[in-house]
Amino acid sequence: MTAQLIPDRPAPARPRRPKRQYGASFIYDVPGPRGRRNILIGSIVSVVVFALIVGLGLWQFAAHGQLAPERWAPFTEWAIWQYLLIGLLGTLEAAAIVAVLGAALGTLLALGRVSQVRWVRFVCGLYIEIARTVPVLLVIYLMLFGLPQIGINLPTLWKLVVPLTIANAAVFAEIIRAGILSLPRGQREAALSLGMRPVQAMTYVVLPQAVRNVTPSLVTQFVSLLKDTSLGYIVAFTELLYRGQVLASYLHLLIPTYVAVTVIYLIVNGSLSAFASRLQRGSRRRTSPQPVLPTLPAVVAVEHIDDGTDSTKADHV
């Protein structure tokens, strides 16, 4: 009987990692070839229609003298842009305060939503639903006209910050709660098995990973928050849109002033949106490398000859 040897098992070739693309199959079905073609056609038609609308608007502006050089000459001076940039600093200040307070309150609400205590979950869920339903403008009017009637008159900045914090804390809470629920249960169980208390496991293991996973969504929410600060003109807070209104009334140049304000908003919000997209792509690229199987040594088959004596015969391949 010829001995059969087990050959070495070569290590599997490491396949080239394909370019990862965002798949939203959990939201809707992935379109097929016809669907992708229809999407491409729709995108082209939308771009053409948008270009036509912009061209028509520019033609109307030119017909009414809005594109005359003398109407745009004031915006070549640094003093005008400096006036608007001071309003931008006010916008960033209000947005930063709301982001810090809203994130802190939202974290507490998210932890309450995943709490094991029923009444805590109910109270936090009730607050989130109410805060997401009530318009922010209504809360601002309450701060502006309602609280002074009972003797509470907050500073101008806080008349804007408090309503925005109430509204955005609910959104931050849902984002962070989604990050917590997206983690495997084994993370918390492993922390508990090491002797950590439930609070320690949530604080040092679960919550940091959840916040890291939803960081792009948090940055995107900050962009939305930055736009919501434009409601500060209602309480006469010195932010970008309020300064734009004052400048338009002073120069009697409505369209050029608001175009300049729009450009500033586009630059700031566009930069933050690009930063959020970069964070999202970076988080998708963090994948573990594929393990490489070790090479097994050659095994020599031993043939036993039953002739009354023990003898071996080895064949090497």
Image (tube, rainbow, N blue to C red):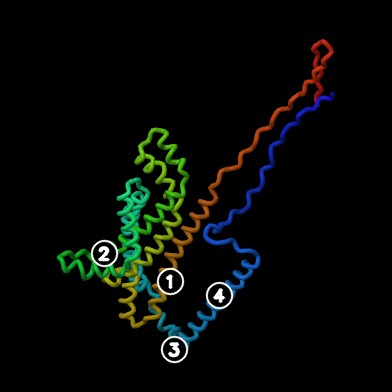
Q: Is residue 142 above or below residue 63?
A: above
Residue ID at (50%, 56%): 278
- Amino acid type for the residue under numbered disc 3: His
Mark 3 surroundings within 10 Å by alpha-carbon count, few (fewer than 14), some (14 through 19), many (20 or more): few
Q: Nearer the viewer, mark 2 or mark 1?
A: 2
Q: Which mark is residue 157?
A: 2
Q: Are marks 4 and 2 in contact (CB under 8 Å)?
A: no
Sequence-wise, which precedes: disc 2 or disc 1?
2
Question: What is the C-alpha distance between the residues marked 4 and 3?
Answer: 27 Å
Mark 4 surroundings within 10 Å by alpha-carbon count, few (fewer than 14), some (14 through 19), many (20 or more): few
Question: What is the C-alpha distance between the residues marked 4 and 2?
Answer: 41 Å
In x, y percent, where is residue 241? 34, 72
Q: List the residue tagged with mark 1.
A: 263
Q: Nearer the viewer, mark 4 or mark 3?
A: 4
Sequence-wise, which precedes: disc 2 or disc 3?
3
In x, y percent, where is residue 171? 37, 59
**Label 4 secondary element:** helix
Question: What is the C-alpha distance between the residues marked 3 and 1?
Answer: 22 Å
Sequence-wise, which precedes: disc 4 or disc 3?
4
Name the side, left or right, on which 17 lies relative to 103.
Answer: right
Question: What is the C-alpha distance between the residues marked 2 and 1?
Answer: 24 Å
Q: Are marks 2 and 3 in contact (CB under 8 Å)?
A: no
In the image, 231 versus 139, the foreground residue is 139
In x, y percent, where is residue 135? 33, 68
